[in-house]
Image: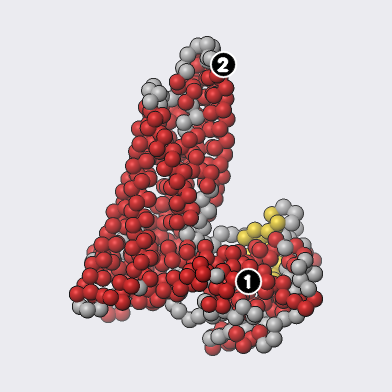
Amino acid sequence: MSPNCSPETLQPPEDIGRHLDVSSESAEMATRSDDTLVCCGEPQESGSDDQTHNEKTNHSRPPCRPHSHHRLCATVDTLTVVKRGRTNFAPAKQTLLKNSLLGIVGFLELANAGDFAANVWNEVPVPAYAVALMAVGGIFALLMSVFAFRDALLSWPNVCVLLEQRRRLRHERVERLKEEDESRKQQTLDVDVLLEVVWRELGTETISRFGLDLLLGAGAVMIGVGTLMAIGGTNKKVWFASNLLSGYVGNAPLALYALINCAWACYICLKARQHWAAAAALLERKREKGRGLDEQDHPAWAAVRRRARNVQLYSAITGVASILGGVGSLMTATMWYGYAILIPVIISSVLCNVWWRHGLGYDRPLFGDDARDMSAASLMSEIEYVALAQDAFKRDQAMAAGEVGADVESLESVLGLIVANDLFEDFCLRLLRDKELASGLFPLDHASFTIEAAGLLEAARKQHAGCVLSAAKKCVREDGLRRFQSRERYLAETLMTFLYMSHSGAWRRCSGPALHV
């Protein structure tokens, strides 16, 4: 028995099934014999039969979301986990775009200023106080390079997810355009919109994060080594190598990154401006026809306006900071006052890192099949639901689950809310961290197993129902607001793109197979 669970709380809630609104298709699937998997342990590394686990439990019907609005992204109700170390588990494969930027990489610009002492006191013999500053600056730069490469490793799965989704969307687009009969050709606006969104996400992840980590990380290594070598500047060869590494060679990666990132920031800023202009023009046309008041007050317009302005401002700041950082870093090789230019760059780097992690970046599941029915009305409807949910969480996190459509006394209903709102992975990992509770729900002795929402529900109903319900409500209470904020951001991004491409003619100009994204 898990701590904090009394014997009474282990009893499953009564009439748990009445809180689900299951579609006929889901009910039909629930009767199939092959839909009975709870946790399917995959073979151990040795591959022997006696180590293969395949535990099955019958269940009546799978959880479904307690609301019926259109969803842009697919819901995820399964999670395959693998053992990391002796007791920890992690997802076997990343299947969604994650806002996983490390906060400490905001100090990479400061790391590239770690050669301050080496460049300012570039003399022999080196003063004692300068030696101390060189040691601190060099070690700090090398340490920051470790975090830069660590963040690059976190960024790479995002790049892979986006590349795979881009490939699938492009394939679907080509398939739609294969029809020789013009009347039978399917429109590709929805796919083109999603491709445009994925293109910007991919470019931002690749250039503004993965590329930054690699280039600035490599620059930090050279600067750190060069700064430490400057301590032994009495040796002429060491002094010369130190000047190269902590000078133009070490700062060249930052200058290269500055040019590339500034160009991309300008592109993103221009796109955000175009998208908001298209949305504002559409709103103005509706207002002229006497239908603009309701739309103007709609949460979707506030989300689009907020997203467009934040993206424009963020891109403008990062673009200017990139250029200043590149120029300043090259100046520092021979002119000490180049470091004065780097001061606002360092400050903006830290602040923009915080801004991205908490105000602009988002977690996004893969786009679902419902995206084929995308329209401005469907996107606005989903944003409206998300906005109401956020208001509920901001008023009272403890009561928010009930306000967004779940029966908080029903495990089935709360689990349905978790699945419908992209919290299933968070919930499963939360359960796995509670070893006493997880041991009664999952085959923890296996190297890999798959968790299904329906199977988890059935297993919890047999034992630990109260503890699982408490964990589910805690997951919704602590992680719900963050998920709804992420959802609003990518929905606003998609709605902006949809309005721009559908009403400005951009979609028609790029409707051929050679679409740039």
Measured as percent of width and height from the top left, residue 276 is found at 29, 62
On screen, residue 25 versus residue 259, left or right, reads: right
Measured as percent of width and height from the top left, residue 256 is found at 38, 37
Q: Earlier in the sequence, mark 2 or mark 1?
A: 2
Measured as percent of width and height from the top left, residue 21 is found at 55, 85
Q: What type is the residue that disc 1 sits on?
A: Lys
Q: Which image quadrant: the C terminus?
A: bottom left
Q: Which residue is mark 2?
A: 128
Decide if residue 178 is in sight here.
no
Measured as percent of width and height from the top left, residue 413 is found at 60, 79
The residue that appears at 76% across and 68% down in the rendered structure is: 4
On screen, residue 43 versus residue 97, left or right, reads: right
Q: Nearer the viewer, residue 52 or 246?
A: 246
- Residue 180, compared with residue 126, is above or below; it is below
Q: Which residue is mark 1?
A: 473
Query: Which mark, residue 118?
Result: none
Q: Residue furthest left?
A: 288
Q: Quadrant of residue 400?
A: bottom right
Decide if residue 87 is in sight here.
yes
Is there a contact, CB below 8 Å, between mark 2 and mark 1?
Answer: no
Secondary structure, mark 2, is helix
